[in-house]
Image: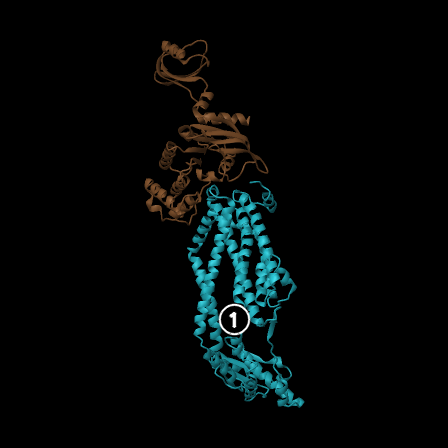
Chain colours: A cyan, B brown
Amino acid sequence: MKNILLILRREYLVRIKKKSFWVMTLLMPILISGFYALLFWGVFNSQEQQKVSIIDESGAFTQKFKNSEKVKFEYLKLPLDSAISRLNQKQTDIVAVIPQNIMDDPSSLRIYTGKGVGFEIQNKIENIIQNEIRNVKLAKAGIDQKILEEADVNVSSKVVVVSKEGEQKEQNTLASTILGTITVILMFSTVVGFGVQVMRGVIEEKTNRIIEVIISSVKPFQLMMGKILGVGMVGLTQFALWITLTFALTTVSSSLLPANQIKKAAQQQMSEMPQKDKDKIAKKVTETPSDAGKVMGFLKSAKSLNIPLIIGCFLFYFLFGYLFYASVYGAIGSAVDNETDTQQFMFPIMLPLLAGYLIGLMTAGQADNKLLFWASIIPFTAPITMMARLPFGVEPWELILSMTLLVISTIGMVWLAAKIYRVGILMYGKKPSFKEIGKWLFYKG
Amino acid sequence: MNNILEVHNVVKRYSQHTALNNVSLNIPKGVIFGLLGPNGAGKTSLIRIINQITGPDEGYVMFDGKKLNQQHIKEIGYLPEERGLYKKMKVGEQLLYLAQLKGLSEKEALEKLKAWFIKFDIKTWWTKNVEDLSKGMQQKIQFVATVLHEPQLIILDEPFSGFDPINADLIKNEILELKEKGSTIIFSTHRMESVEELCDHIALINKSEKVLDGAKSEIKERFKTHTYNVEYAGNLGEIGNGFEIVKTEKIEDNFSAATIKIQPDIPVNQLVRLLIDQVELRSFGENIPSMNDIFKMVVNETID
């Protein structure tokens, strides 16, 4: 035990002292919170006003395009060529051509631009035209605008999860799906990343030829475990720093965006809407939040997720998933002389990892998916796929079953890996086959 | 107990071949023991068993009267033939780490290391990365790592490979000093001149079997050919029964050299008397086989 701790300490310190560790550890939360801040900034800060020239060949949209803070419309009666030359001379940013037959062929709208058009503006132009076409067609059919407005109800739902104890909890499917996806990606990349570090460490000791000196002092198993645990501690340290830093940075960056700015953004968005829509929204604003309101609601419901449970489970599944795969990586490292020889062995371990990753990503949000359920029970894929299920709530017995199976198979895997490792580290020169490695399992001490 | 190590009927098999076939040998305390043999003879397998890196399939090993066990690891220092260090680790940290793996406390290790660093005059190396040292310098560090915990038994596998003559001498003197202090040294090599110089006892392993062992002097006695080298002035004629002149040659001006074989039961003095009567003696000595000769002789014999 003392030896394992000594080895663990060395493996840990060597990695913690590396510059690359700190660069990665500090950069990630900055990137994440920077992304987060950028997202808010993009939503709430208007960019430069863009000039949109409308060539209305149908003549049905006169006065329908209203200027706003972000867009300034102008009507042109020019042939397309000269309109486009205005584009080239930077007299306008966007040219939208509404053809004569737009009523019959709604997809014939063309938008020309010199530098690309933002999704928001494209959407705005399309919406205005779409609304107008609808109004015209409704009028033709003799349907009163008022009746339509009354009929146009906006249905939105709140998902309430009822536990067996009768406790009711609101669930935000979107927040859960996003969290599930992020944790799936994080779990996959860290298990693979730190697993490969273990493999490299083993190969390094082999090529350095220090291995024989060390195992004349400690048992191969102690060396392997010390290394795996040491690298695992590096992983946990990194998570701890990421969680603290991300929390600190997002707190700072969201405090830079005070609530009244969000409110202002919501008001601004409303002011851009046509008057009748505004009335409609004003009427129902208490039930149907605006987009900005939705962001607030999302953040609120994200907070209602059981974050401590998710973090706790994440750490548990990381620890055992990592142990499971790192011991395989360690065994591979012991069997080869250099990293290029690892190729043939990498595929079989990447297979279950990738399967878990893809299942987790594709079925995130489908809490009752059967494939996802089984993948989260089977130890090979459980560490990754369980992450996709956790935000939606998992039955305790399922969690316990999955965890128990994982712990048992991790012990088994470590035991098998140790047998391969013990023989592998002393083998030089020949590239072993799977058959050869299979034989090592039966070697006596 | 006079033997630090006793190997009893050890067999080690790998899937394709037998590395050690029923090998037994005793290593007395306080000697420098030469473990000799051609490449692939099984020396490394035996050393690994002594170091408990692998276990024997049959047979057992006794260390200082007790069956070899985990406790003995800290009593053994091992310098493998294929040796290395962590390249990106500082020399001082690395030695502290290796010493602690051998069971020393950090404080003890530090004290002992200080003494060695002063002795070898390498104090400035402490904070250097291993990769910044030359190969010879790294070898010195490895030697320090091997003996730092003052083990009873030191196993050196080809210790001089990679050393320049000056550093080789330095290490040679250290080995002799360790012997003085009571350590036993197993010295695995196929460089016979260092065996000649350092070893008290030897064992020769060839093709997985021990083919020869014992004290060096006794082995030489066993392999001596009862031939004598003579240098003289004058003419050497017939010297009578029981003596055979193997060859003679002129060496310079008036001097000649001859190799004479005598029957084992005839005293040497008798030969000397005969020679004095005939020629003017310049030198006289017994032709004692070198370890190199014995090595070749035995290895070739077992090949045939």
| Chain letter behind tag 1 | A
User: In the rendered picture of this protein, how many numbered marks are placed on residues?
Assistant: 1
Residue underneath mark 1: A303
Which quarter of the figure has residue A65? bottom right
Residue B203: image x %, image y %?
48, 29
The answer to whether residue A341 of the structure is visible from this angle is no
Residue A373: image x %, image y %?
63, 62
Considering only vertical position in the picture, is A394 above or below B226?
below
Which quarter of the figure has residue A184? bottom right
The residue furthest right is A141
| The C terminus of chain B: image quadrant | top right
Residue nearest the viewer, comparing B196 with A246: A246
Residue A224: image x %, image y %?
51, 48
Crowd class of label 1 (few under 14; some 14 to 19; many from 20; radius 10 Å): few
The answer to whether residue A217 of the structure is visible from this angle is yes
Considering only vertical position in the picture, is B232 above or below B156?
above
Which quarter of the figure has residue A437? top right
| The N terminus of chain B: image quadrant | top left
Secondary element at image label 1 = helix
Residue nearest the viewer, comparing B303 with A144: A144
Residue B162: image x %, image y %?
41, 38
**Residue depicted at x 38% and y 44%:** B109
In the image, taking residue A251 as reference, residue A278 lies left or right, namely: right
Tag 1: residue type?
A: Lys
**Residue depicted at x 62% and y 63%:** A372
